[in-house]
Amino acid sequence: MRSPRTVGLLALLIALLTAWGMPRPDDDQLSMRDASGFGSWFDSPQEVEPLYRTVEESPVGPRRTWTVDPAGTRFALEFVSGDGVAHRIPLTLSGALELDARNLDMARGTLAVDVSTLDLGLEEGLVSVDLRGGSVGTMPREVGSRAMGGVRIRVRVGDRAQDVDGSLEVRRQGPDRLEVHLHDLPGLDMDTLGVGGLVARLGSRLGAGRLESQPTARLVLLLRAGQTSSSP
């Protein structure tokens, strides 16, 4: 018959082995385990990188259509005149993007650019912006958090197009609201897009004389969640 001391030691050993195999307190099925090896439960706390974050549980899949909210969206082309003065031309965007909260790099969609305010004779629907993907990762979960990475967009004017790469910052403003900032976009080549001849007319209208033919795009999108989809 085992002594009480032996029984106690066996119980302690079993408890230690059980704890050794338990997941860390901050691990779950949606997290990537700490890479330091099995049995790191007793180590000092380390950050566990989430594989997927969501604002709240939902019976549907994480793919959603996010619509541009014109009230918080700012889009403009900034031309520089021959004397070095910048002239910002505000434009209006409309449309929607399909985003997957698990991987924003799979985002796709086309936004229409309203150029009627320029009064340059451009047809309605002639100008658009396509989202071509990026390197952002998962959607930020908590309000006030953000995700950053690269992005590629394609600017279309009729059958002409130009791809530009820049930096992207996605800020969570609410459960159904995202603010997207595009930075470091290179200048658009109006000649490549087939509208170089309109730049001189625009410069004359602004009283700016000659304008450089490669304006910089300034873009901040406010997106609101709409339709959901269970598609992968």
Image (cartoon, grey):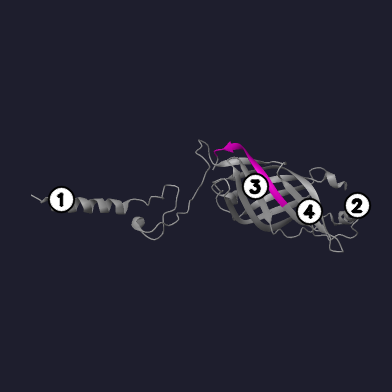
Q: Which residue is mark 2?
A: 205
Density class for disc 4 (Cα within 10 Å; few <14, some 14-19, many ≥20) is some
Q: Residue furthest bottom?
A: 83
Label 2 vs label 3: CA separation? 33 Å
SS for dot 1: helix
Label 3 vs label 1: CA separation? 61 Å
Q: Which residue is mark 3?
A: 179
Position of residue 45 relative to residue 174, above or below, is below
Q: Which mark is residue 7?
A: 1
SS for dot 2: helix
SS for dot 4: strand
- Of the numbered discs 4 and 3, the one sitting upstream in the chain is 4
Horizontal and vertical percent position of residue 156: 76, 51
For the point 65% across and 49% down, which residue is it?
Answer: 180
Density class for disc 3 (Cα within 10 Å; few <14, some 14-19, many ≥20) is many
* Amino acid type for the residue under numbered disc 3: Glu
Which secondary structure dominates the residues rendered in magenta?
A: strand
Label 4 vs label 1: CA separation? 78 Å
Q: Is residue 190 visible?
A: no
* Amino acid type for the residue under numbered disc 4: Leu
Q: Which span is picked out in magenta?
A: 219-230
Label 4 vs label 3: CA separation? 19 Å
Density class for disc 1 (Cα within 10 Å; few <14, some 14-19, many ≥20) is few
**Contact between labelled residues 2 and 1, with CB atoms less than 8 Å apart:** no
Horizontal and vertical percent position of residue 218: 74, 53
Q: Which residue is mark 4?
A: 77
